[in-house]
Image (spheres, rainbow, N blue to C red):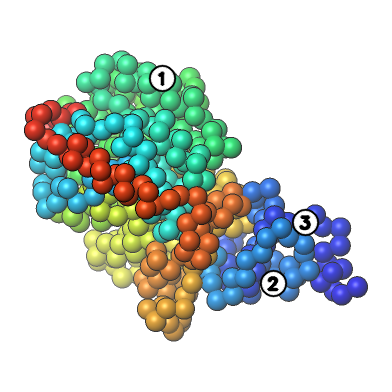
Amino acid sequence: MTSSAAASAGQETADLIITGCTVLTHDEQERIGFTEDAAVVVRDGAVEAVTTAAEAAGRAAVERIDARGQVALPGLVNCHTHAPMVALRGVAEDLPTEEWFNDVVWPVESNLTERDVVLGARLACAEMIRGGVTCFADHYFAMDAVAAVVAECGMRAHLGEAFFSSQGPQGRERSLEFALRHRGGADGRITTALAPHAPYTVTDDDLAATADLARAHGLPVHLHAAENRDQAETSLARHGATPIEILKRTGILDTDVLIAHGTGILDRDLPLLEAADGLTAVASAPRGYLKFAWPTTTPVRALREIGIPVGLATDGAASNNSLDVWESMALTALVQKSTTGDPRWLTSRQALHHATLQSARAVGLGDRVGGIAPGRRADIVLVGLDGPHTQPVHDLAATLVHSARSSDVRTTIVDGRILMRDRELLTLDVPSVVAELRERLPGLLDRSHGKRIQDYDT
């Protein structure tokens, strides 16, 4: 018996073995490291072992991937998006925030049908899978359709049915019913949240009722808050409180809450966030802030100092034009260096930590995904570094953050299932989605009716 055969004796057949790769790992202090010439053994949708390629050579497996020359990373998490809004990519360009909402996006969204949401979600999931995103947190309408697409395509998702107070109590009730109906769906790949839109579109009474429902049903909350500095200043002028202070007084900060954007978080808000009873996290999507010319960005460094995880996000493609979390990772590092005036912050390894474990924690999945280690779900992406733009490699972390692109992702795996192999999507038919969506665009984009789903006034 050979040594490899002896090593595999008595071991059950693996579902998948990825071999010959360099694996991104975290040590006990969560520092980023890399293990070369490694193998990842997957069974029952989870990582069973991270070992050497030599030790895995004799292990029986249903499927093997030769990943020599590639880097295995935990799948990226898009911590805040509106996936179906890819259908609106590029329709509202070079506009201030108020005009973007009131003149284009909210009038167009009054035309949305469930079929538009299905097609948009399929196209978005295809884009994210191709970009190495294995999980996304979505906050939108007609979310039953999004949940069905997630089940269909194999991704992992944290979903919430958005509501405004202008919808009456029915909006909040639908959000709760959705969350309870789909919690644990898609073989456990779907988690859910209550999804009030924002403090400027949801009343204090509705926010307080949402907090009560969250505690009663063990659900988290996902909402926009302190999106920009104008919102914070307007809230202070009108209500004598910042958006974060409103979340505190309505009980939202006593729940597990994911706050989208937070570029308007003020110094006075930090003690409230630090003292929050629930798991509080912030999702940062820097590309959109640059496009809207907002004067501030998410205060990542200040939030880190008080223990608030900041996850990476893209927001919807109507504002960001892209669902590229890889770009969000690089921009987060660059924008933080610029705003703090400190080239030592964020480092490439810190950016990778935000892209992996911190993003997983932000969506409440820090014990399940975000790392490649025994017991964690096998959400893994393989990245090729053979392009001229990634060679030579002197610092692998810097190469991944600042040189590699989402198009360098070769293979995407969720729960041990291969969703893309060697750049070929296996669970979605993009040409048919694009063809049908094109046919529906004239009706979707019509604004002649003069309606809008809400008014932006902050």
* Dot 3 or dot 1, earlier in sequence: 3
Left or right of 126? Residue 438 is left
Pointer 2: what residue? Answer: 53
Residue sitting at x 43%, y 68%: 408
Do the numbered discs 3 and 2 sit on residues whose CB atoms are within 8 Å? no
Q: CA distance from mark 3 to mark 1?
A: 47 Å
Front residue of this view, candidates 343 and 151: 151
Residue sitting at x 87%, y 75%: 2
Amino acid type of disc 1? Answer: Asp
* Dot 3 or dot 2, earlier in sequence: 3
Secondary structure, mark 2, is: helix
Q: Position of residue 438 (x, y in %)?
A: 26, 46
Pointer 1: what residue? Answer: 212
* Dot 1 or dot 2, earlier in sequence: 2
Q: Quadrant of the N terminus?
A: bottom right
Does 155 sit above or below residue 215?
Answer: below
Does 114 sit above or below residue 43?
Answer: above
Mark 1 nearby-residue class (10 Å; few <14, some 14–19, many ≥20): some
Amino acid type of disc 2? Answer: Ala
In which image quadrant can residue 203 be found?
top left
Mark 3 nearby-residue class (10 Å; few <14, some 14–19, many ≥20): some
Identify the disc placed on residue 13. Answer: 3
Q: Is residue 74 visible?
A: no
Q: Quadrant of the C terminus?
A: top left
